[in-house]
């Protein structure tokens, strides 16, 4: 698959691009926001395309050429204000869903968050959890072949290849970004993960076994 990654220059995005480059079955196309960011991708041999989730995405899809799948790994981050949470995490995601539908591209992987919920209240980051939850709800209602991955807090620790995954996990916890990226690449490999939405933490189950459990449930 040729896979367009929004947020490719982010911490998880860069790992995703690297894993896709290493995979014999996939080819990443990094969606980045400025030409200065291109050097990293040129060095690793990944294609890149300029694109901003706050702008129309149709020209980006056109410039990217054939695309078989899309990964949303972007995020406004904690350093910007709540208005960016709405315009990137919520509206940017919704814009990307509409653009994929219009372009006839079926496969969509959403990097969401544990506790993402359109009705989130009383949590210190409820505005973010609502934004992610609303975007996820749009995706579930779409015609796309979606998978929604809802990790806990992301860390830069090395991955272990072992996770805990379930429709709902309690309490929350953390997971290395490398393991999140591994799970997402396996979801691309596995059409049986379309229609799944699951919480994801570091754990003790090998990734494929964890996905088998979800796909079979
Ligand atoms: N951090 C956590 O603990 C946590 C937990 C659960 C879920 N998540 C979710 O996991 C995903 C990845 O998180 P991360 O911490 O690895 O990401 P990150 O390092 O913060 O990177 C986010 C990326 O999004 C890009 N971006 C921001 N605004 C954009 C826009 N308007 N158009 C296109 N791209 C834009 C940034 O671009 P630039 O490089 O140009 O700035 C950056 O590359 C996010 O969706 C986040 O909400 C995070």
Image: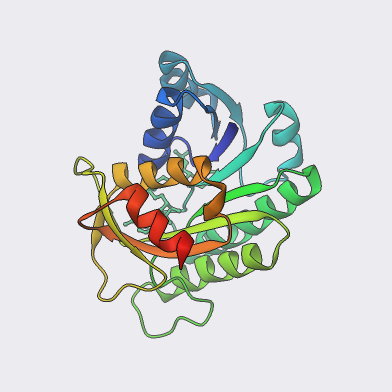
Residue 53's spot in the image, x, y percent? 61, 47
Horizontal side of 168 relative to 206 (left or right) equals right
Q: Is residue 193 visible?
A: yes
Front residue of 90 and 19: 19
Depicted 4 relative to depicted 216: above or below? above
Depicted 215 relative to depicted 41: above or below? below
Depicted 141 relative to depicted 106: above or below? below
Depicted 34 relative to depicted 89: above or below? above
Horizontal side of 184 relative to 89 (left or right) equals left
Count every numbered label the image shows and give the total. 0
Front residue of 162 and 155: 162
The N terminus sits in image quarter: top right
Q: How is the image coloured?
A: rainbow
Residue 23's spot in the image, x, y percent? 44, 26
Q: Say which residue appears at 31% left-offset and 62% top-offset.
A: 152
Q: Say which residue appears at 58% left-offset and 70% top-offset.
A: 134
Horizontal side of 82 relative to 170 (left or right) equals right
Q: Say which residue appears at 37% left-offset and 85% top-offset.
A: 122
Q: Say which residue appears at 46% left-offset and 52% top-offset.
A: 75
Residue 162's spot in the image, x, y percent? 24, 50
Furthest-bottom residue in view?
122
Q: Quadrant of residue 33?
A: top right
Q: Is residue 88 visible?
A: no
Residue 66's spot in the image, x, y percent? 71, 28
């Amino acid at each position: 698959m040729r896979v367009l990654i929004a947020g490719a220059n982010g911490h998880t995005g860069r790992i995703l691009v690297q894993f896709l480059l290493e995979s014999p079955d996939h080819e990443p196309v990094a969606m980045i926001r400025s030409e200065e960011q291109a050097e990293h991708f040129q060095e690793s041999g990944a294609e890149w395309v300029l694109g901003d989730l706050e702008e129309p995405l149709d020209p980006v899809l056109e410039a990217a050429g054939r695309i078989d799948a899309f990964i949303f790994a972007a995020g406004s981050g904690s350093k910007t204000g709540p208005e960016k949470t709405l315009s990137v995490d919520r509206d940017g995601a919704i814009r990307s869903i509409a653009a994929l539908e219009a372009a006839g591209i079926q496969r969509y992987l959403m990097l969401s968050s544990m506790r993402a919920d359109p009705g989130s209240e009383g949590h210190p980051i409820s505005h973010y959890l609502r934004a992610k939850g609303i975007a996820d709800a749009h995706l579930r209602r779409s015609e796309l072949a979606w998978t929604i991955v809802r990790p806990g807090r992301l860390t830069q620790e090395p991955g272990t290849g072992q996770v805990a995954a379930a429709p709902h996990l309690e309490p929350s916890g953390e997971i290395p970004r490398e393991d999140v990226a591994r799970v997402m690449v396996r979801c691309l490999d596995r059409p049986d993960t379309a229609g799944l939405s699951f919480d994801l933490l570091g754990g003790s189950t090998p990734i494929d076994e964890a996905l088998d459990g979800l796909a079979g449930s």
